[in-house]
Image (tube, grey):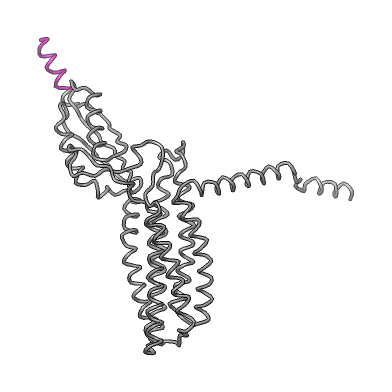
Amino acid sequence: PHLRRRQRGQMLPQYDAKSGRAARLEARSKLGSFISSIFETQDSRNLFFFLIVNLSFAFVELLYGIWTNSLGLISDAFHMFFDCSALVLGLVASIVARRNPNEHYTYGYLRAEVLGGFINALFLVFIAFFIFKEALERFLDPPHVHTHRLLMVAVAGLGVNLLGVFVFQHGGHGHSHGGDAGHGHSHGGGSCDGGHAQESGGRNFIMDGVLLHIISDTLGSVGVIISSLLIHQYGWMVADPVCSIFIAVLTFLSTLPLLRGSIRILMQRSPPALETRLQGCYQAVQRIPDVIEFLEPHFWSLTGSVYIGTIRVRIRPQGNDSQVLLAVTSIFKNAGVANTVVQIERSAQDVGQKYFDREVRDI
């Protein structure tokens, strides 16, 4: 029996105090690094501070919405909770997107901002359908709404949302990704040969998604104010679900551009902003001396403002690889493509013809 107890004791896992302390120190270090990275850029600072304000007021709206039995206020409170999740998602994505490339993610983590925008757009679509469904049910059977306790909270919510719109619209909406300067901007201009103008920052899907959430919340607060005034003055209980339906439709329609834009990038679609310029680039490539043809052009967006491309170029045997490579990359760089991979190939037909002509001369 003593032997069996000793064996069972030996099989129990031993707690290593040193390894546990090291794990806690590592976790504390990662948390400290994450918190410090929040305050590195203006976008992430704005996201963090507005998250605190938004989360606090969401609880106030929810409690008052339940107390006053207002769908508009309850739906606006849940919308604000979803906004908080959108703010958290945007905050994490903005920090992850600044991480440097490595052997596993050779382009870096810039695509995190597109993924964050896509998820935020899905959140908004879900919110719009939820509000629309609940509003239809209340439209058929309008409940009594206590407007005397509703208006004050709705006005306060409008003030919070207007603050968020001002902060994110004017408080540093532009951004940069760091690293190579060619990866931080996109280019305007209509043709491939005629120079290019640098845009101020390009599209940021994280901030677009967060701003859409806040604008939708602002519309929700306006709807609650209008419906409460109509109910108070005329007793129109149906005004609450009607305003909610209007808000749901506006939210859905305003989300479609963000959803469509993020899907295009995630599906590797050719950038719409480059389509006209790419046609001019292809013509310019075809005019390069010793170029026979180009094959398999592939161009896509890494983010809303960083374009990547690959192309095969077939040249004559006597052509200069370096000169053609330099000319092709210069053409697409002037069009706004940050990174173009060019594969130079020599025409097999021309090579065979060259050897045939040499044999004929020898004979």
Up the image or down, 217 lies above or below 114; here it is below
Total count of labels:
0
Q: Position of residue 209 (x, y in %)?
A: 39, 58
Q: Position of residue 338 (x, y in %)?
A: 31, 38
Q: Camera-side residue: 254 or 220?
A: 220
Up the image or down, 155 lies above or below 316; here it is below
The structure residue drawn at horizontal position 24% and vertical position 32%, both measured from the top left corner, is 330
Using residue 1 as the reference point, say whether residue 311 is left or right of it.
left
Q: Camera-side residue: 187 or 161?
A: 161
Using residue 222 as the reference point, say whether residue 29 is left or right of it.
right
Up the image or down, 111 lies above or below 214; here it is above
Q: Camera-side residue: 87 or 349?
A: 87
Using residue 108 as the reference point, say whether residue 14 is left or right of it.
right
Quadrant that contains the C terminus: top left
The structure residue drawn at horizontal position 27% and vertical position 32%, both measured from the top left corner, is 342
The structure residue drawn at horizontal position 20% and vertical position 30%, both measured from the top left corner, is 314
Give the extent of the magenta segment: 351-363
Figure quadrant of residue 83: bottom left
Q: Name the dominant secondary structure of the magenta segment.
A: helix
Up the image or down, 147 lies above or below 361; here it is below
Q: Is residue 188 magenta?
A: no
Q: Position of residue 28 (x, y in %)?
A: 63, 47
Using residue 25 as the reference point, say whether residue 129 is left or right of it.
left
- Of all residues shown, which one is farthest toward the bottom? 235
- Of all residues shown, which one is farthest toward the right? 2
Figure quadrant of residue 159: bottom left
Q: Position of residue 190 (x, y in %)?
A: 18, 44
